[in-house]
Image: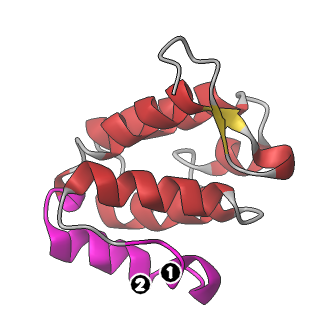
Amino acid sequence: MAMGGSAWTGSGDRRVPAGGVFAMVNALAELPSMLSEAGRTALIRQLRPGIATMARQDPRPRLCLLNLVQTCLEHEGGLVEMLEALYFIEGDSVPMRRVLAQAHALFGASSEPLAQLGRGGGE
């Protein structure tokens, strides 16, 4: 995989640069709730079955989160669904704001579902 950001992940219209996915995973790994396997499992259980059953879990946080982000990208609205669940768990914390900033960088600030998160739409 190229380190210069030329690799892509996801499918169809949801293809995003791998570097953006890695930045999102790094931000997710800073969330207190994502530090434990129990926290990651709790998040996954909040997602629709098509995502929850397909996301490969791993005891290593970054691998689990990478698998989860990639699975969410393969499902229409999956990443927003994950972010909504995380916002409920984390609230308006500084680490959560970093995650939302990464999501906006990945999809653009004009993404309507993302625009609602952190502004009262995710509560």
Q: Which quadrant would residue 111 be assigned to in this image?
A: top right
Residue hosting label 2: 45
Mark 2 crowdedness (10 Å alpha carbons): few <14, some 14-19, many ≥20: some
User: Marks 1/2: CA distance?
Assistant: 6 Å
Residue at 60 percent of width and 25 percent of height: 105
| 52 relative to 72 in the view: left or right | left
Residue at 58 percent of width and 76 percent of height: 51
Label 1 with label 2: CB-CB less than 8 Å: yes
How many callouts does the rendering have?
Answer: 2
Rendered view: 56 above or below 32: below
Eye-nearest disc, 1 or 2: 1
Q: Secondary structure at mark 1?
A: helix
Q: Secondary structure at mark 2?
A: helix
Question: The disc labelled 1 sits on which kind of residue?
Answer: Ala
Q: Is residue 48 magenta?
A: yes
Towards the viewer: 26 or 113: 26
| 38 relative to 2 in the view: left or right | left
Numbered badge on residue 52: 1
Residue at 34 percent of width and 36 percent of height: 27
Would you say residue 122 is visible in this rendering?
no
- The image position of residue 92, as x and y in percent, is 36, 47
- The image position of residue 7, as x and y in percent, is 62, 27
Rendered view: 6 above or below 45: above
| 54 relative to 24 in the view: left or right | right
Question: The disc labelled 2 sits on which kind of residue?
Answer: Arg
Towards the viewer: 70 or 80: 70
Rendered view: 113 above or below 19: below
Would you say residue 24 is visible in this rendering?
yes
The stretch of residues the image draws in magenta is 33-56
